[in-house]
Image (tube, rainbow, N blue to C red):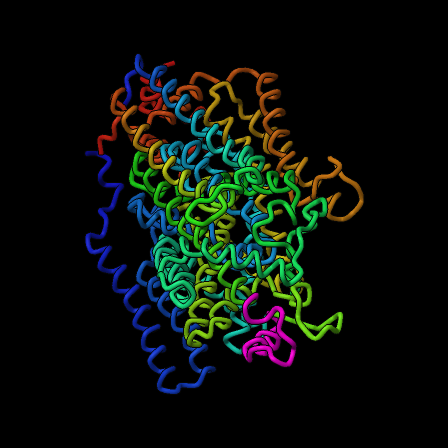
C-alpha cells in the first residue's frame, strides 16, 4: 500500500505522465493528417514518408509508447512504495 | 497471504497446452494442403477447413468450462499478459476489422488508414488512462466499475442499459460478416451460417463465460494472424523475392502508381459526410492508392479516427478484461501485448491491400474482356468482383473493374494463383475473428444484463448459482435475438461498426475519464455525462441517418461520437459542480483506486462484508449495513 504522505506526489507524477502520453496520442491522430501531403515528398524504405508515418510509424510509435509508459509508471510506483505485494 | 486463496494458481503447462492446439491447427492445414496436391475435391477441402477449426475451438471451450462465478466473470484474475493481449487484440480486430479494413484500403487507399490510426490510438489511450484503474477496481463489467466507484447500483444499471445497443450492433456486424464468409465456403445458406455462428458463440460462452472465451480467443488470434500472413508472405515471395510483405510493399507502390495513372485513375475530390467510405456492393477503385484525402475529406479523416479511437478506448468488451490480469502492473503489460498484437495486424493489412491492388492492375486492368485470367470468372460468380466494358473501347479500365470490399481478403490468394487451401485458410481466419469478437460483444452485453441489472437492481441477494443461470440465459437470448435480426435485415457492417463505436465513445469515454481522473466527480455528474453524451450522439445519428435534419450541420451521423464526447464532458463537469461534493468515503475509495498496489476493491468489499448478510455484489449494499470491520477499514484510508 502507498503511504498517505506520498499519495499526492505519486498522483502528480502519474497525472503528468498520463497527460504527456495523451498529448502524444492526440498529436498523432490530429496533427499528422495535416502534414502528410508535405511529408510525402520524402522517401523512407521506398515508401513516401507521410504515408509510411501514418501506416506504420504511428502504430509502432504507440506500441513503444504503451511499453515505455508501463515501465515508467512501474518505476514511479516503486519510488513511492506502491509496489504489488502479492 | 490472506489473498492467495482467491487466486487459483496458473496452469504451469499453459504454454504446452496452447502449443498443442496451435500445432493441431497447423497440422490440419498441412494435411489438407497435401491432400489438395493429391487431388482432393475443393468442396471437401473447403468444408473441412471451415468446420475442423470450429471443433478445435469447441474442445478448448469444453476443457475450460466452469461453474464458478469468479471464474466465469474474471477467470480468477490469473490470465498472463501475453494471453490476455492475444484475446484483447482479436476482440478489437474481429471479422469486421479483417475484411473491411483490408477492403477499404484496397478501394480508397490511404484514406482508410483513419480506421487503423483510431484503433491503435484507442488501445494506447485505454492502456494509459483506464485499464490499470479498472483492474484495481476489479469489477466484472464496465457498468460494474461505475457502480463500485460511486456505490450506486442505479448508475450501474443505467450504464448497462446504454451498453446494450452498441454491443449488440457490434455482435450483429460480426455475425453478418462471418456468415458472409461461411456461406461462400461451406455451401450453406446465409441464414444457416448466421445460426451456426450464433450457436458457436452461445456454446463457448455458456460453457465457461470469459474463461472459455479468453482461451479460445488466444488460439483464434493465432489463426487470424496466420491466415492473413501466410498467403501474403507467399505472394510477397512471388512478387518481390522477400518474405517480409510489410516492408517490401513499398517497392510496389511506385509501380502501382504508374499503372494507376496509365489506366485512368485520376486524383479525386472527396464527397462530404463520409460519402467516399466504401459500401458493401462491389465498386470501382478510382482513387490512386497514395493520394491523401481523395475519398474522405481531411476533416472526415480526423473525425473518423477520433470516433474509432473513442469507441475502442471505451469499448466494454475490451475493458471488462482489465479484471482478468493478476495485478495492476500486470494489467499495464497486458495492454502492451494487446497493442503489439493489434499493431501487427494493422501493419499487415495495408500490405495485403497493396499486393492485391498490384496484381489486379497487372493482370486485369487494361486487358480486353476476352483475355482476362480465368480466376476472375470465379470471383464474378461469387459476387466478389465484377467487370463490364462500359465505354466499349475493348479494354477494362480502372473504372470498369468493380471489387467487393469484403472480398479483397479472399481474392488475393485467388489472384496470385495460390493453392486453394490458402484461400480457405484466409476464410478460416475471418471466421475465427468473427467468433472471437462476436463472443466478446455478446459476453459484454450479457454480463451487464445479469451483473448490473439483474443482481445489481432487481434481485440483490441472488445466489451465485442464480446469477450464473441468468448470465447464461442472457447470453442465449441476446445472441439468438441478434442472429434473428441479422437474418431479416440488410446493413453495411463497416457503417454499423463505426456507428456503434461512436455510441460507445459518447456514452462511456467522458464518464470514464471523469470518474478516474477527477476526484470531485459525483454520481449524478457521471449519470449526466453518460446520458448527455448518449442523447447527443443518438439524436444526431438518428436525425442525420434518417435524413430528417442534424444537430451539427456537415457531420455524418456515423461520426456522432465527435460531438457526444465533448457534450458528455461539459455536462458531467457542470452537474458535478452543481451537486454536493462526494462523501469522504467515496473520496477514500477514489484514492484507493489510484493506488496501484493492494487488493482489488471488488475483492476487498467481498472479503469485508459481514458473513451472514454478505451482499453478493459489492456496491449494492445499503449504507447502514456496513459492518464494523468495513467501517474500520475505511477509516484507515486518508481523508
* B95 falls in the magenta region: no
Most foreground residue, B94 or B624:
B94
Question: Which residue occupies the extreme right position in the image?
Answer: B548
Residue B257 seen anywhere in this rendered image of the structure: yes
Screen quadrant of the N terminus of chain B: top left
Q: Is residue B71 above or below residue B103?
A: above
Q: Residue at x 58, y 16 (%)?
A: B577
Q: Is residue B379 above or below residue B302?
A: below
Screen quadrant of the C terminus of chain B: top left
Q: Residue at x 59, y 18 (%)?
A: B579
Q: Which quadrant of the structure image shows residue B493? A: bottom right
Most foreground residue, B153 or B251:
B251
Residue B316 seen anywhere in this rendered image of the structure: no
Q: Position of residue B497 (x, y in %)?
A: 58, 51
Q: Is residue B629 above or below residue B359?
A: above
Relative to residue B100, is residue B627 drawn left or right?
Answer: left
Most foreground residue, B187 or A55:
A55
Most foreground residue, B382 or B70:
B382
Q: Residue at x 36, y 77 (%)?
A: B33
Q: Which quadrant of the structure image shows residue B206? A: bottom left
Q: Position of residue B93 (x, y in %)?
A: 47, 52
* B363 falls in the magenta region: yes
Relative to residue A83, is residue B111 drawn left or right?
Answer: right
Instruction: Give the magenta part as a residue range.
Output: B361-384
Q: Position of residue B291 (x, y in %)?
A: 60, 48
Q: Residue at x 71, y 73 (%)?
A: B389
Q: Position of residue A86 (x, y in %)?
A: 22, 34
Amino acid at each position: 500500500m502507498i503511504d498517505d504522505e506520498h499519495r499526492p506526489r505519486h498522483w502528480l507524477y502519474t497525472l503528468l505522465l498520463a497527460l504527456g502520453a495523451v498529448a502524444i496520442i492526440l498529436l498523432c491522430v490530429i496533427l499528422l493528417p495535416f502534414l502528410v501531403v508535405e511529408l510525402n515528398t520524402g522517401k523512407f524504405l521506398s515508401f513516401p514518408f507521410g504515408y509510411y508515418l501514418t501506416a506504420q510509424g504511428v502504430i509502432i510509435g504507440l506500441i513503444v509508447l504503451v511499453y515505455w509508459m508501463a515501465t515508467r509508471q512501474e518505476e514511479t510506483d516503486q519510488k513511492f512504495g506502491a509496489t504489488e505485494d502479492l | 497471504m490472506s489473498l492467495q486463496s482467491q487466486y487459483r494458481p496458473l496452469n504451469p503447462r499453459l504454454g504446452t497446452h496452447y502449443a498443442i492446439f496451435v500445432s493441431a491447427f497447423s497440422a490440419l492445414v498441412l494435411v489438407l494442403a497435401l491432400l489438395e496436391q493429391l487431388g482432393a475435391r475443393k468442396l471437401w477441402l473447403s468444408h473441412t477447413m471451415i468446420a475442423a477449426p470450429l471443433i478445435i475451438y469447441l474442445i478448448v471451450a469444453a476443457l475450460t468450462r466452469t461453474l464458478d462465478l469468479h471464474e466465469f466473470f474474471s477467470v480468477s484474475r490469473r490470465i498472463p499478459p501475453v494471453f490476455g493481449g492475444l484475446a484483447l487484440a482479436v476482440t478489437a480486430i474481429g471479422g469486421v476489422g479483417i475484411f473491411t479494413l483490408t477492403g477499404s484500403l484496397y478501394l480508397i487507399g490511404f484514406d482508410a488508414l483513419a480506421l487503423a490510426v483510431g484503433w491503435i490510438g484507442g488501445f494506447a489511450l485505454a492502456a494509459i488512462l483506464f485499464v490499470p484503474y479498472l483492474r484495481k477496481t476489479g469489477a466484472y463489467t464496465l457498468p460494474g466499475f461505475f457502480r463500485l466507484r460511486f456505490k450506486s447500483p442505479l448508475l450501474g444499471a443505467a450504464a448497462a442499459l446504454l451498453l446494450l445497443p452498441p454491443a449488440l450492433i457490434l455482435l450483429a456486424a460480426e455475425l453478418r460478416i462471418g456468415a458472409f464468409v461461411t456461406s461462400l465456403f461451406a455451401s450453406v445458406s446465409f441464414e444457416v451460417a448466421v445460426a451456426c455462428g450464433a450457436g458457436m458463440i452461445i456454446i463457448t460462452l455458456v460453457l465457461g463465460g470469459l474463461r472459455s472465451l479468453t482461451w479460445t480467443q488466444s488460439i483464434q488470434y493465432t489463426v487470424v494472424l496466420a491466415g492473413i500472413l501466410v498467403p501474403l508472405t507467399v505472394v510477397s515471395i512471388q512478387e518481390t523475392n522477400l518474405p517480409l510483405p510489410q516492408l517490401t510493399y513499398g517497392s510496389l507502390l511506385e509501380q502501382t502508381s504508374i499503372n494507376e495513372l496509365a489506366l485512368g485513375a485520376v486524383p479525386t475530390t472527396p464527397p462530404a459526410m463520409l460519402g467516399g467510405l466504401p459500401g458493401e456492393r462491389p465498386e470501382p477503385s478510382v482513387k490512386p492508392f497514395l493520394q491523401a484525402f481523395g475519398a474522405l475529406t481531411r476533416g472526415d479523416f480526423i473525425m473518423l479516427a477520433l470516433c474509432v479511437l473513442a469507441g475502442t478506448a471505451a469499448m466494454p468488451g475490451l475493458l471488462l478484461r482489465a479484471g482478468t490480469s493478476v495485478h495492476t502492473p500486470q494489467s499495464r503489460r497486458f495492454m502492451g501485448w494487446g497493442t503489439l498484437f493489434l499493431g501487427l495486424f494493422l501493419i499487415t493489412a495495408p500490405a495485403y491491400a497493396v499486393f492485391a491492388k498490384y496484381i489486379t492492375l497487372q493482370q486485369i486492368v487494361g486487358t480486353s474482356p476476352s483475355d482476362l485470367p480465368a480466376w476472375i470468372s470465379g470471383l464474378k460468380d461469387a459476387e466478389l468482383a465484377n467487370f463490364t466494358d462500359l465505354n466499349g473501347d475493348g479494354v477494362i479500365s480502372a473504372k470498369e473493374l468493380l471489387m467487393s470490399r469484403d472480398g479483397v481478403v479472399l481474392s488475393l490468394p485467388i489472384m496470385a494463383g495460390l493453392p486453394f487451401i490458402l484461400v480457405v485458410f484466409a476464410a478460416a481466419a475471418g471466421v475465427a475473428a468473427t467468433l472471437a469478437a462476436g463472443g466478446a460483444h455478446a459476453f459484454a452485453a450479457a454480463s451487464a444484463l445479469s451483473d448490473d441489472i439483474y443482481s445489481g437492481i432487481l434481485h440483490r441477494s441472488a445466489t451465485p448459482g442464480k446469477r450464473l443461470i441468468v448470465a447464461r440465459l442472457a447470453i442465449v437470448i441476446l445472441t439468438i435475438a441478434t442472429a434473428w435480426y441479422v437474418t431479416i435485415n440488410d446493413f453495411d457492417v463497416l457503417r454499423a461498426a463505426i456507428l456503434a463505436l461512436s455510441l460507445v465513445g459518447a456514452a462511456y469515454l467522458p464518464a470514464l475519464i471523469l470518474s478516474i481522473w477527477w476526484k470531485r466527480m459525483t454520481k449524478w455528474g457521471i449519470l449526466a455525462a453518460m446520458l448527455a453524451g448518449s442523447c447527443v450522439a443518438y439524436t444526431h445519428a438518428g436525425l442525420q441517418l434518417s435524413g430528417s435534419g442534424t444537430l451539427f450541420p456537415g457531420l455524418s451521423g456515423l461520426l456522432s461520437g465527435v460531438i457526444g464526447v465533448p457534450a458528455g464532458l461539459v455536462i458531467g463537469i457542470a452537474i458535478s459542480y452543481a451537486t454536493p461534493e462526494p462523501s469522504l468515503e467515496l473520496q477514500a475509495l477514489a484514492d484507493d483506486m489510484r493506488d496501484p498496489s493492494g487488493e482489488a476493491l471488488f475483492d476487498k468489499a467481498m472479503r469485508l462484508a459481514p458473513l451472514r448478510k454478505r451482499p453478493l455484489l459489492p456496491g449494492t449494499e445499503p449504507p447502514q449495513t456496513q459492518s464494523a470491520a468495513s467501517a474500520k477499514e475505511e477509516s484507515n484510508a486518508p481523508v
